[in-house]
Amino acid sequence: MNRSTPIPETVTLHVPFRIMKRGGRKEMQLPEGATQSRRTDNTLVKALARAFRWKRMLETGEFATIADLAEHERIAAPYLTRTLRLASLAPDLVEAILDGRQPGNLSLEMLRKPLPTGWSEQRKVLSSDGHCDNPK
């Protein structure tokens, strides 16, 4: 464009993205390679906090069994057990979630599924599924 070219009234901009549902809300997912700002997933952070709190309550003897704790929390024992698994995640994976560096496709339901107990195996499993952007 130069000074003699008239300015168009309408400018069309095409941005590739897709809408995904996460935790009951819709989010925009940009294509691979596009830079995204860090975004903490409050659902994952809240689940991590609960998992570590429940683990501490069991380890200190405040509750003798998962069933006792589930009854106290007024939730189903299987739900508590699945969420409690998050307390066994590798520290760098926990840190990535807390810092908002987790991949956009990582969901709470993915982390509630059985994972290996070894941290290096967890990284491999999550990395091979495309769920971990920085495995060590």
Image (cartoon, grey):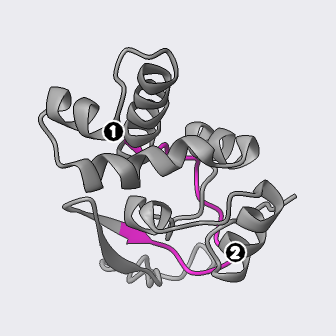
Q: Secondary structure at mark 1?
A: helix
Outermost right residue: 136
Provide residue 58's location: percent of width, then percent of height. 44, 26
- In this rendering, would 22 be left or right of 39? left
Residue that extends furthest to the left in the rendered view of this protein: 74
Picture quarter containing residue 132? bottom right
Please tell me the numbered disc located at residue 125. Answer: 2
Q: Which residues are magenta?
A: 28-42
Can you give x and y, in whole percent of width and height, for residue 115 in the image? 59, 66
Q: Is residue 114 magenta?
A: no
Magenta part, dominant SS: loop
Residue 35 lies within the magenta run: yes
Q: Residue at x 49, y 71 (%)?
A: 105
Q: Which mark identifies residue 66? A: 1
Judging depth in this view, the residue of 67 and 75 nearest the camera is 67
Please say whether residue 133 is visible from this viewpoint.
no
**Label whose residue precedes the other's in the sequence (2 or 1):** 1
Question: Which residue does the image show at 59% across and 72% down from the upper left?
Answer: 3
Instruction: Give the amino acid type for the residue marked by disc 2 in the picture.
Output: Val
Three-letter amino acid code of the residue under disc 1:
Ile
Q: How many marks?
A: 2
- Callout 1: few (<14), some (14-19), or many (20+) C-alpha neighbours within 10 Å? some
